[in-house]
Amino acid sequence: MKLSGLRIALVGPMPPPAGGMANQTRQLAALLHAEGAQVQLLAVNGPVLPPWLARIRYLRAALRLPVHLWRLSRAANTVDLFHIMANSGWSWHLQAAPALWIASLKGKPALLNYRGGEAAAFFARAPRLVSLSLRRASAIVVPSAFLARLFEQHGLTAHIVPNVVDLARFAPAAAAAEAAPAGGPRILVARHLEALYDNASAVRAFALVRQAYPAARLVLAGG
């Protein structure tokens, strides 16, 4: 195995809820394990809190932070590498940045896996503070050229690694295939209907699809 024996602390959210980054973290853990790595998963959305407490945004963060720091410190004594899933906002300051600093203080390399469409606005609000933590990372990976260019603007190199997609999980249902118009695929875009998620690009891409498949249909599904 290529990664046989490598001890990795994977820091990130896990389902539930089944959000995009949580699903990426779960799939990455499985793939690393399949390659022979010893993965220690440090879920940032744990420990489990009572439902009424979990709904209080800042209080739940304050209760989880000491546990998060303790788990990071313990993991740093036993792993070879930190792989940190990161996003913008408070999750950066309370989850990703502490992981970067603890890894740095313990002398362990840290791979930062950064994602999030609001990165530009987030960096602009506190560029020095964010950059101070970013420079603790041994390497940075992002899922898009957009984010790679953003990091370049701040003097940082980010390598593009696309999101993991398990194609084995997706197959057209027989009934749906029979109901679809002849020659017309149905395309689903499951993104929130906010400017942040750039559904306009999906519509422009669909215009190209319609040139080849005039009967194609596009469904935008999101809140």
Image (cartoon, rainbow, N blue to C red):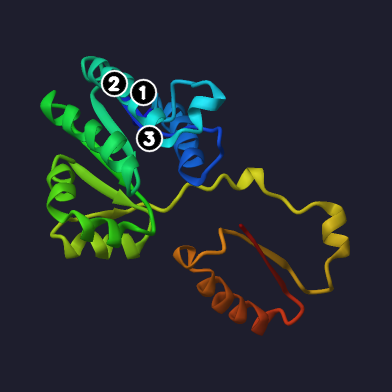
Residue 96 drawn at (x, y percent): 28, 37
Quadrant position of the C terminus in the picture: bottom right
Along the viewing direction, whichever of 5 and 138 lies nearer the viewer? 138
Q: Residue at x 35, y 46 (%)?
A: 87
**Dot 3, how many residues are within 10 Å of its Cα: few (below 14), some (14-19), or many (20+)?**
few
Which residue type does callout 1 highlight?
A: Leu
Q: Nearer the viewer, mark 1 or mark 2?
A: 1
Residue 66: mark in rendering? 2
Residue 25's place in the image compared with 177, above or below, is: above
Residue 192 drawn at (x, y percent): 56, 59
> Which residue is the site of mark 1?
63
Along the viewing direction, whichever of 37 and 208 lies nearer the viewer? 208
> Which residue is the site of mark 3?
58
Q: Check disc 1 and report its element: helix, strand or loop.
A: helix
Q: Residue at x 38, y 27 (%)?
A: 1
State left or right for residue 142 relative to residue 135.
Answer: right
Whether pointer 1 and pointer 2 mark residues with C-beta atoms closer than 8 Å, the reply is: yes
Q: What whole-number distance in Å separates the C-alpha atoms at marks 3 and 1?
A: 9 Å
Q: Residue at x 67, y 81 (%)?
A: 210
Which residue type does callout 2 highlight?
A: Pro
Q: Residue at x 85, y 53 (%)?
A: 174
Along the viewing direction, whichever of 22 and 28 lies nearer the viewer? 22
Which residue type does callout 3 highlight?
A: Tyr
Which badge, 3 or 2, is on the more N-terminal residue?
A: 3
Which badge, 3 or 1, is on the more N-terminal residue?
A: 3
Q: Nearer the viewer, mark 3 or mark 2?
A: 3
Q: Which of the 4 image quarters holds residue 12?
A: top left
Q: Check disc 2 and report its element: helix, strand or loop.
A: helix
Q: Check disc 3 and report its element: helix, strand or loop.
A: helix
